[in-house]
Image (spheres, rainbow, N blue to C red):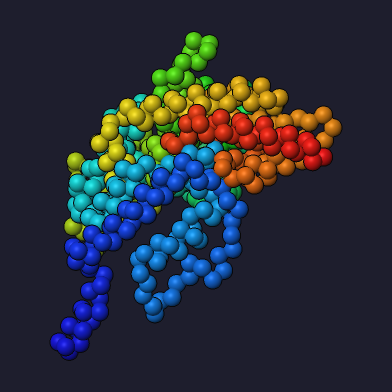
Amino acid sequence: MRHHIEELERIGKILSPDSVQRATDIELISNFCSKFINDLEISNAYNAPNSLTGRLELNLNETCKLADILLELESSMIANGLNPASGGHLGYIPGGGIHTGALGDYLAAVTNQYAGVNFAGPGAVKIENELIRWMCDLMGYPKGSLGNLTSGGSTANLIAFVTAREARSISSIHFHQQCIYLTKQVHHCVHKAIRICGLKDAHTRFVEVDDQFKMRVDLLEKYILEDIASGLIPMMIVASAGTTDTGAVDPIYQIADIAEKYKIWFHIDAAYGGFFMLSDIDNSNGTKLKDLFKGIDRSDSLAIDPHKGLFLSYGLGAVLIKDVESLYKAHYYKAAYMQDTIRSNEELSPADLSIELTKHFRGMRLWLPLKYYGIRPFKALLEEKILLCRYFYSEIQKLGFEVGPYPELSVCIYRYVPEHQDINEFNEKLLMEVHQIGRIFITSTSIEGKYWLRLAVLSFRTHMNEIELLLDILKNAKEKVLMDY
Ligand SMILES: *Cc1c(COP(=O)(O)O)cnc(C)c1O
């Protein structure tokens, strides 16, 4: 048996490379990444996807050279579809991928700290909770508030809704009496989270929006009163602080007044817009951009996405909860094999505040860059994005395009209205033309039957150059589509 064990050890040893091998591997990866980043200056943000049949497939009985694997990634993964790392990514809500964040992931993976339980990984847990406390503080939540680092905004919203449900001890026999208030402009993951947490049987009330796509507070109150009169229970209001379609921020302060008056759980989905709270930008009418968020501190829970607003690679959202005991009660479980992990007074364990137990030590990717650089460059880039969007909004009108509402944050909608052709069809063609070129990537949306092109500026690599490029592309594409008719 001893011989057999030694033989198995020998076979498995390849998974523990020595320092020479590690250095060789790292150099290959580092060169690959370096070339990838340098190429972003000139490479496309979008390439029509290629079929991957016969590629990137596993062959578990063979080994492969790392250099060959990287070549395969280059030919089959990079430059296939959207390149989210590109500064030319101006569609959906762009993410980021700051390099120091990637190094944070490397540190997290190599040290593999147990960030779920304070008893096991007090340093890692402290790092994660520090980040959450900072975000709570930024939102004006009181000391003692906490939350959880999630994989993204979808999970963050889900955790918040489960907490709202449990805080009011709402069980399935009560679901059909509950009312949830939101607008048609909420992100679809809000509906998904409502379904997953069982509240599909609750009444979803769509409160109409005004001409800036913001929730109409007068109607919100009207619906609440109607529901109370018919014996239903207003349970939760979901406001958006930066909608995905247009970047609109619902009137948070007035919604908070109503939530307080009728004792309704107030959740804010700030997945996209939340970090603009860091900005010091002035509006033309003498107000500050930050004023849009006034009253955000009066919410009960909030979702926010550092993988959007803080330019990190995908996989980092956060849920913030004012009453941490309700979050704890909704997620804490005991287990015999966990009996050594007593609740610490100093730090709550992320595992007691979320769906997950064992999880990626995802805080390191944010903690490292914040510790390294401080907040200043993040703030500057967020302000730059706002101004770039405003710049685009005014320049695109000079090219004869129609625009939606003035952008409150860094998203705006626009479309070309041709004299004789169908407007929606024309703009679809325009989008296809932009995709065909591929240097810059934009997306579209439909609001009440109207097809709009969207601009979403949030990549840390998007600067004036990319906006000018897009304006140029749109100008030429418009001429081309007009000619084609
Ligand atoms: C992106 C986004 C979400 C979803 O977040 P994920 O991180 O993609 O799960 C939710 N709400 C808004 C407003 C968003 O922009």
Q: Residue furthest top?
A: 286
User: Which residue is drawn at the image coordinates 23% and 42% (left, top)?
Assistant: 126
Q: How many marks?
A: 0
Q: Quadrant of residue 412?
A: top right
Q: Residue furthest right?
A: 420
Quadrant of the rendering where the C terminus is positioned: top right
Q: Position of residue 362 (x, y in %)?
A: 33, 48
Image side of residue 225 versus residue 376, left or right: right
Residue situated in front as seen by the camera: 304 or 325: 304
User: Which residue is drawn at the image coordinates 56% and 42% (left, top)?
Assistant: 439
Q: Position of residue 274 (x, y in %)?
A: 44, 32
Image side of residue 277 versus residue 52, left or right: left
Q: Is residue 179 among what the camera can see?
A: no
Q: Position of residue 351 (x, y in %)?
A: 31, 51
User: Which residue is drawn at the image coordinates 27% and 33% (left, top)?
Assistant: 373
Quadrant of the rendering where the N terminus is positioned: bottom left
Residue situated in front as seen by the camera: 142 or 247: 247
Image side of residue 217 versus residue 3, left or right: right
Residue situated in front as seen by the camera: 311 or 200: 311
Q: Residue furthest left?
A: 2
Q: Position of residue 108 (x, y in %)?
A: 27, 52
Residue situated in front as seen by the camera: 282 or 342: 282
Q: Quadrant of residue 70?
A: bottom left
Q: Is residue 374 among what the camera can see?
A: yes
User: Which residue is drawn at the image coordinates 54% and 38% (left, top)?
Assistant: 90
